[in-house]
């Protein structure tokens, strides 16, 4: 997996989707990233009310089920959270890394999910 996936990489993953292992699927990489981040944030007490962790975990479930809307909502929320905390002056390097990884993983997962949907629609026709 490169930083920005090419069309060929997306098609290859979508066409070989059933044969890939757990971490061979980009949506599972994103799912794992969310679970690990939520665990770290919750353990570190980064969220006082836990609502954000609950929202991210709910989105993670739908991302695991390959819902494109959940991937898009997660990307928007992650960017919004990063920008908000960055403007408040909180640990900018951590936020930049989180934002870049979340955005790139979301972008790749969204493109693969879209290609899978196109492949499914082509089989129906």
Image (spheres, grey):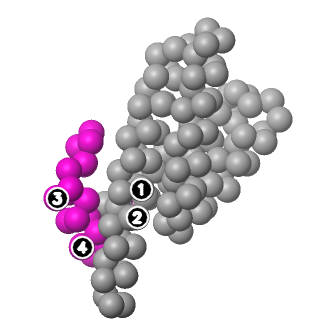
* Span colored in magenta: 1-23
Task: Tell me how far mark 1 sits from mark 2, CA to CA.
Answer: 5 Å
Q: Tags 4 and 1 in contact by the CB under 8 Å rule?
A: no
Q: Residue furthest top?
A: 89
Mark 4, residue position:
15
Q: Position of residue 115 (x, y in %)?
A: 33, 67
Q: CA distance from mark 2 to mark 4?
A: 11 Å
- For label 2, the residue is 113
From what the image shows, is residue 47 above or below residue 84? below
Q: Earlier in the sequence, mark 4 or mark 1?
A: 4
Residue 95, how many percent across, how many down?
52, 23
The 10 Å Cα crowd at callout 2, few under 14, some 14 to 19, many 20 or more, is many
Residues under numbered marks 3 and 1 in contact, where contact means CB atoms less than 8 Å apart: no
Image height check: is 119 above or below 123? above
- In depth, the one of 123 and 105 nearer the eye is 123
Label whose residue precedes the other's in the sequence (2 or 4)? 4
SS assignment for the magenta stretch, majority = helix
Q: Residue at x 26, y 42 (%)?
A: 4
Front in this rendered view, residue 54 or 9: 9
Q: Quadrant of residue 25?
A: bottom left
- Measuring from the top left, give residue 101's x and y in whole percent: 41, 36
- Residue visible at 47% across and 16% down? 93
Q: Is residue 66 something that shows in the picture?
A: yes
Residue beneath disc 1: 110
- What secondary structure is marked by label 3? helix
Residue position for label 3: 8
- The residue carrying pointer 3 sits among few (fewer than 14), some (14 to 19) or many (20 or more) residues within 10 Å by Cα, namely few
Instruction: Using the image, tell me which numbered label, if any, was put on residue 85.
Output: none
Residue at 49% in and 45% down: 33
Q: Could you give the CA–CA distance between mark 4 and mark 1, rounded to whole angstroms?
A: 15 Å
């Amino acid at each position: 997996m490169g930083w920005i996936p090419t069309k060929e990489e997306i098609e290859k993953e979508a066409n070989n989707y059933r044969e890939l292992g757990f971490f061979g699927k980009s949506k599972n990489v994103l799912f794992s990233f969310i679970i690990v981040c939520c665990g770290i944030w919750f353990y570190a007490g980064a969220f006082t009310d836990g609502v954000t962790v609950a929202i991210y975990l709910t989105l993670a479930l739908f991302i695991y089920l390959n819902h494109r809307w959940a991937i898009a909502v997660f990307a928007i929320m992650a960017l919004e959270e990063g920008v908000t905390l960055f403007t408040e002056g909180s640990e900018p390097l951590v936020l930049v890394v989180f934002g870049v990884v979340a955005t790139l993983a979301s972008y790749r997962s969204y493109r693969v999910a879209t290609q899978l949907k196109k492949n499914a629609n082509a089989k129906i026709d």
